[in-house]
Image (cartoon, helix red, strand yellow):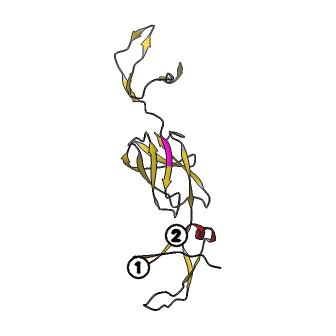
Amino acid sequence: FFVSGGEMLCSLPSNIRAKKYRVRMSIAGVLGRDFVTIQLVEPASIASLIPSVGERGTLVTVVGTSFHPDMKCRYGAHRHVGLEYVSSTQVRCIVPIDLPDMPIELGLSLANDAASSTSQSFKPIDLSIASISPSFGGVNGGTPVTLDLRDPDAAQFVTHCLFAKTAVPVSSVG
């Protein structure tokens, strides 16, 4: 099917195996000498995101199947960023810092297409601390400390406070 300016449009046949194929042109059954290759891959499937909630800039581990080194992380319908390929079942994506304040679908894509995988929801949150009370405490520990977060919705996801490198489980306020 002729498109324009020497471009041809062909559709991939359905139900063919995932592998590398030669693509050639023919005229009335006579094959042209030149060919190009195309790599067909199984559709990727995302099982989980670790974590599925976090600050913008968070490194997210994506777990699933049929991942490919040439894939990119896709946020929403159009935002594509590079990834760190670990294996066919694991990649890592960095959450862009300019995402909106709402859950967004994280998927994987090849060649900036709309979708080459299933997707999972990631919720960006802001863990900025507005204030701490009290601002002094004893070295023997045990002093209850209240942290006021700028994003009130983020509090439900926080599991620990870190004092230097010492993690302490969070307990609810009120």
Residue 99 percent coordinates (x, y): 56, 58
Q: How many residues crowd mark 1 within 10 Å: few (<14), some (14–19), many (20+)? A: few
Marking on residue 87: none
Answer with the quarter of the image where residue 132 lies.
bottom right
19 or 2: nearer the viewer: 19
Numbered disc 1: secondary structure: loop
Which amino acid does the dot numbered 1 rest on? Ala
The structure residue drawn at horizontal position 50% and vertical position 46%, both measured from the top left corner, is 47
Judging depth in this view, the residue of 24 and 151 nearest the camera is 151
Q: Which mark is residue 164?
A: 1
Q: Secondary structure at mark 2?
A: loop
| Mark with earlier residue (1, 2) | 2
Q: Count numbered badges in the picture.
A: 2
Q: Is residue 130 above or below residue 67?
A: below
The residue wearing badge 2 is 159
**Could you tell whether 46 is left or right of 31 in the image?**
right
Residue 135 image offset from top left, x and y in percent: 52, 89
Cα separation between marks 1 and 2: 16 Å
Kindly identify the amino acid type of the residue bearing the numbered disc 2.
Answer: Thr
Question: Is 55 located above or below residue 42 in the figure?
Answer: below
Are discs 1 and 2 less than 8 Å apart at CB? no
Label 2 crowd (10 A; few <14 / some 14-19 / many >=20)? few
Query: Residue 43 lies in magenta, yes or no?
Result: yes
Check if residue 136 falls in the magenta segment.
no
Residue depicted at x 46% and y 92%: 138
> Relative to residue 97, is residue 170 depicted above or below?
below
Question: Image point 44% across, 10% down: which residue?
Answer: 27
Q: Which region shows up in magenta?
A: 42-47
- Residue 76 in the image: x percent, y percent? 57, 49
Is label 1 or label 2 in front?
A: 2
Residue 110 location in percent, x, y? 46, 39
Q: Residue at x 53, y 40 (%)?
A: 115
